[in-house]
Structure formats: C-alpha cells, structure tokens
Amino acid sequence: MTVRKNQASLTAEEKRAFTNALIEIKRTGVYDRFVTTHNGFIMSDTDSGDRVGHRSPSFLPWHRRYLIEFEAELQKVDPKVALPYWDWTTDRTSRASIWSPDFMGGTGRARDGQVMDGPFAYSGGKFPINVRVDGRSYLRRSLGSAVAELPTKAEVDAVLNMPVYDAAPWNSSSNGFRNHLEGWRGANLHNRVHVWVGGQMATGASPNDPVFWMHHAYVDKLWAEWQTRHPQSTYLPAAGTANVVDLNDTMRPWNDVTPADMLDHRKFYTFDTEPAAAAASQR
C-alpha cells in the first residue's frame, strides 16, 4: 500500500527518488500530458456539458483520480515513490525546506521569475516548460509576492468543521466545504496557495511546477480529514442535477470513474498520519 508522507519528513534519498522520477516522466513526455489535461479543465464553468475539475462539486474527486494516475506513472519509474504532501499551514515561508536546492528549488529571480536552483531549474536542461501559457520555456515562481500569507491552521480547521460537502448552485458561489476549500469563498485556501507560489502555479498550466502535486496531495488529505470528521456527510449532489457531476455520474476525461469511486482514498493509498492499523487493514 502506498503511503503518502509529509514532504518535510522525507529523507534525502526519498527526495532524490521523487525528483528523479519527475524528471524521467518529463523526459518521456508523460508529464506534459498531465499538464495539458489540467489546463483543458481549469475553466470548467464554461466547458460544454457537466462542469468538472474546478468550480464544481467534482473538484475533489476529479483531482484525487488525477493524482492517482500521476502517482502510478511515477511508480513505473520507481515503485518506491509516492506523492508527498506539502502542509502549507506549517511550512509556510520561502525559507522552508521544501524550497531547498536539493528538492523543489527556490523562488524566481526578480527580473523574470525564473527559478535558478534545484533540479527543475531551466539551466539544468532537464525540465523545460513545454505546455506554455506565456511563451516562456523556464519554470517561474514568485513566492509570497502576489499574496503575503499562506493559509493558517485555524483557517483550515474552520473549513474542516463545515458539515455539508457542497450546495446549490454547485459552482464558485456555493456555500459548503468543497467551495471553501477550493477557495472561491471564505478564507481562500487552495486558490491562495497557487497565487502565493506564483509563476506557472498561478495559471491553468499549474502542474508545470512540480510543487503542484504536493499542494494537491495536501488538499486531498484535507478532504480525507473532513470525511473522518463528518462520517454522516458525503459527496453532493446525489442525483438529477443539471450540468454538474452527481455522485454516480462519470467524470471527464475518464469514461469509467465516478465521484462515488473516489470517496475512499484507502483503496489506493494512506497518509502517514493515519493509524498503522487502518493502513494495515487495507493491504
């Protein structure tokens, strides 16, 4: 069973294995296919058909499936690799270890935002940006410049205490856990992190920045924590809702995956904070 760990607890060997796998699937073109998929679904409010991916109830199950498929590609390179998560309520400054030269590299230089250190720096030649929204072929960041503070534990806890998953009109104006976590209402959690990182992370092609995967692994973990806090609450809407993915509707671009299929993450992986007995029971 795959165990997703806090990136702050990774060993040097685990960091190298993760970054090496990312670079390998970038080399083969697999990585960029995931970027293209995400970019195609970012503006889901204007997509034809059911809204999926963003600004809709399926935001969380869509990304859960998306991350599972990406993790599987990394494990084809190295079976020991799992997606780490970035707890941005704790590791919340540009000096945190996640931004060290042996892992994600740091912020971009002042004149153009280009990341100059770490394994994904353009100068290293191993991580060109091929799915471009601004014509630039290098990874960019501007940590903490567009918004000063990452979300706090108190802000996250308030959202985790919301008892209802989602509500009509099932979009970016909805009042419920999903939309408050996504960040269109309230404390602006998920969205604020994208803007805080800046560069490609603040665009529809945000998976161009490898930190995307750790950010969304943490968002996914927060959904799992919400499910534990509210065992009587589940994905909404249940059925018969126009232009929205209901519980048992299939999600694009997949033809065989529904939100119901994604409700129990323990069928696929566990988190390092979950009881060992629970993890063992899923093996």
Image: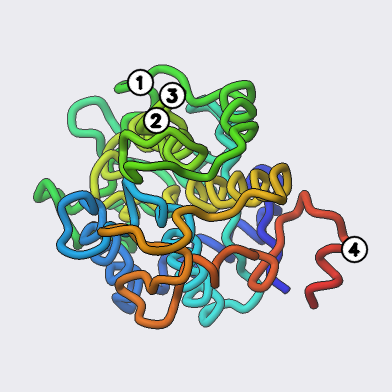
Task: Give amino acid for label 4.
Answer: Ala
Q: Are marks 2 and 3 in contact (CB under 8 Å)?
A: no
Indicate the secondary structure of the residue bearing disc 4: helix
Mark number, residue 81: none
Distance from disc 4 to disc 2, alpha carbons, whole Å, reads 35 Å
Quarter occupied by the N terminus: bottom right
**Disc 2 + disc 1, Cβ < 8 Å:** yes
Marks 1,3: beta carbons within 8 A: no
| Residue for point 21% across, 61% down | 40
Identify the element where label 2 is drawn.
helix
Mark 2 or 1: the one toward you: 2
- Residue sitting at x 31%, y 49%: 206
Q: Earlier in the sequence, mark 4 or mark 2?
A: 2
**Residue labelled with disc 2:** 192
Label 3: state its secondary structure. Answer: loop
User: Callout 2 environment at 10 Å: few (<14), some (14 to 19), or many (20+)?
Assistant: many
Residue 131 x/y as whole percent = 19, 60
How far from the left and from the top, in percent, is residue 160? 62, 35
Residue 211 image point, x, y percent: 44, 48
Up-down relation of residue 76 to residue 199 (above or below): below
Graded by Cα atoms within 10 Å as few (under 14), some (14 to 19) or many (20 or more), the crowding at tag 1 reads some
Distance Cα–Cα, label 3 vs label 4: 36 Å
Residue 147 is labelled as 1
Label of residue 186 in the image = 3
Q: Position of residue 19 (x, y in %)?
A: 50, 60
Residue positioned most to the front: 240
- Against 256, residue 274 (above or below) is above
* Residue that label 4 marks: 277
Per the model, the C-alpha gap separating discs 2 and 3 is: 11 Å
In three-dimensional space, the C-alpha distance between marks 1 and 4, rounded to whole angstroms, equals: 40 Å
